[in-house]
Image (tube, helix red, strand yellow):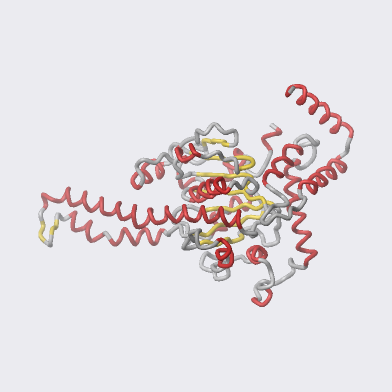
């Protein structure tokens, strides 16, 4: 039965491709898009869902795909961007100058976020309180992260029904997000891209913690106890001082930030599922290092909330998430793919992460063994042979992963 249906589909696809021109083909795709975008009266429901997008991708594959300058999925992305851009122009929103405080108030929160950009990581005064009203909607039962706001890093004029949220890793708090995700911005110039700012700590704070322990290291190196030099105790004292430093890093720096990542991930899930901030938007998630922990806690919380209409693609790089944590996950809230880029020679994950969490088996070192067709494990050792090499080589990694694309279907 399945074989007959497949043969029939192939026959009808050939008939369509042989009988219609490109203009009719485009008209058919636009009509299908609007057919999938019928509104729903239910609160926080989506008129365009991640599953709608997945179905359109599958249908568009069979409509003269790859015969023109653009693939049909790229045309779908263009339609997704054209509709909201036209709507905002009709409403006159695109011409509003949001540098003037008096015009910000009447706009929706999403419009404010879309139109507010910063030049450096220090200029976030317009962002910091943006989610205060949303937190009131979520209620007191949801833990609020110590820092959490969204910053649009793509061009302010770009609008789309599909947005991408990028989540940076450990000690990225004082780094400009537009610079961190520069390659993503250059690769997807017509995609609406946001960065999640969270309390990921800073290298300055990390160095401050280490400098605080310098006197104890000097004393240990001299074999000094209560001001008395006892050279025979030097190895023991150095070992004790080193242990104290790593314990401090684990509990006071890494441990606090790790918990903050979990809280931020769960909070993001509730922002997506239980507020109207991203209503009628499909969401892609991109994360690096500790940012992958935020993303996966968001995914697992969406599973608990049974929200299968929001997330389309998930792109993980150098992930710190424990591979065994996927054993209880179905990933059925992800409509398309979970892409896990890993590298066996990532010594930051292999050694430094083990020092603060010995029992972990991070997904950044190897594949996610879940047996789910949505999971794509990609060894990027040939392009990024270490934890700090991902961003410098994203231009080589992205063509392999087919994130927010459908080029591999043409191969």
Residue at position x 58%, y 63% in the image: 137
Q: Nearer the viewer, residue 357 or 378?
A: 357
Q: Residue at the location (67% across, 35% down)?
A: 408
Residue 46 higher or lower than 411, as above or below: below
217 or 19, which is in the foreground? Answer: 19
Q: Is residue 125 left or right of residue 64?
A: left
Where does the C terminus fall, quadrant-wise? top right
Residue 375 in picture, x, y percent from top left? 57, 36
Residue sitting at x 38%, y 53%: 255
Q: Nearer the viewer, residue 32 or 178?
A: 32
Quadrant containing the N terminus is top right
Return the residue nearer the eye: 221 or 174: 174
Whole-percent x, y for residue 272 in the image? 60, 54
Kindly identify the residue that appears in the image at 79 percent across and 27 percent down: 10
Residue 283 vertical placement versus 60 (above, below)? below
Would you identify the image quadrant in which residue 99 lies?
A: bottom right
On the question of residue 189 being in view, the answer is no
The spot of residue 359 in percent (x, y) is 36, 40
């Amino acid at each position: 039965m399945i074989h007959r249906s497949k043969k029939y589909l192939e026959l009808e696809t050939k008939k369509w491709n042989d009988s219609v021109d490109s203009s009719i083909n485009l008209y058919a795709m636009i009509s299908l898009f609007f057919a999938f975008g019928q509104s729903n009266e239910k609160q926080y429901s989506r008129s365009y869902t991640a599953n709608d997008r997945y179905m359109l991708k599958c249908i568009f594959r069979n409509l003269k795909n790859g015969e023109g300058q653009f693939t049909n999925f790229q045309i779908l992305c263009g339609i997704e961007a054209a509709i909201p851009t036209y709507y905002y122009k009709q409403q006159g929103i695109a011409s509003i100058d949001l540098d003037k405080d008096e015009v910000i108030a009447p706009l929706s929160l999403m419009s404010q976020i879309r139109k507010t950009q910063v030049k450096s990581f220090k200029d976030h005064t317009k962002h910091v309180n943006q989610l205060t009203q949303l937190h009131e909607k979520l209620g007191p039962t949801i833990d609020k992260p110590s820092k959490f706001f969204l910053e649009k890093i793509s061009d302010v004029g770009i609008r789309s029904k599909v947005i991408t949220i990028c989540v940076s890793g450990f000690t990225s708090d004082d780094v400009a997000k537009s610079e961190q995700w520069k390659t993503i911005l250059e690769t997807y110039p017509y995609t609406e891209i946001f960065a999640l700012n969270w309390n990921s700590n800073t290298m300055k704070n990390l160095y401050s913690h280490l400098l605080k322990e310098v006197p104890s290291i000097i004393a240990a190196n001299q074999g000094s106890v209560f001001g008395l030099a006892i050279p025979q105790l030097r190895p023991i004292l150095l070992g004790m001082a080193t242990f104290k430093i790593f314990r401090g890093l684990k509990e006071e720096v890494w441990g606090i930030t790790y918990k903050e990542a979990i809280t931020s991930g769960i909070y993001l899930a509730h922002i997506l599922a239980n507020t109207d901030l991203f209503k009628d938007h499909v969401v892609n998630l991109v994360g690096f290092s500790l940012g992958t922990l935020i993303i996966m806690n968001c995914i697992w919380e969406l599973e608990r909330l049974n929200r299968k209409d929001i997330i389309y693609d998930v792109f993980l790089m150098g992930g710190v998430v424990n591979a065994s944590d996927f054993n209880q996950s179905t990933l059925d809230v992800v409509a398309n793919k979970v892409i896990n880029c890993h590298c066996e020679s990532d010594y930051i994950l292999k050694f430094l992460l083990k020092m603060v969490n010995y029992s972990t088996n991070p997904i950044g070192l190897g594949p996610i063994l879940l047996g789910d067709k949505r999971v794509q494990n990609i060894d990027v050792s040939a392009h990024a042979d270490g934890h700090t090499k991902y961003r410098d080589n994203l231009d080589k990694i992205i063509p392999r992963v087919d994130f927010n694309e459908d080029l591999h279907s043409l191969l």
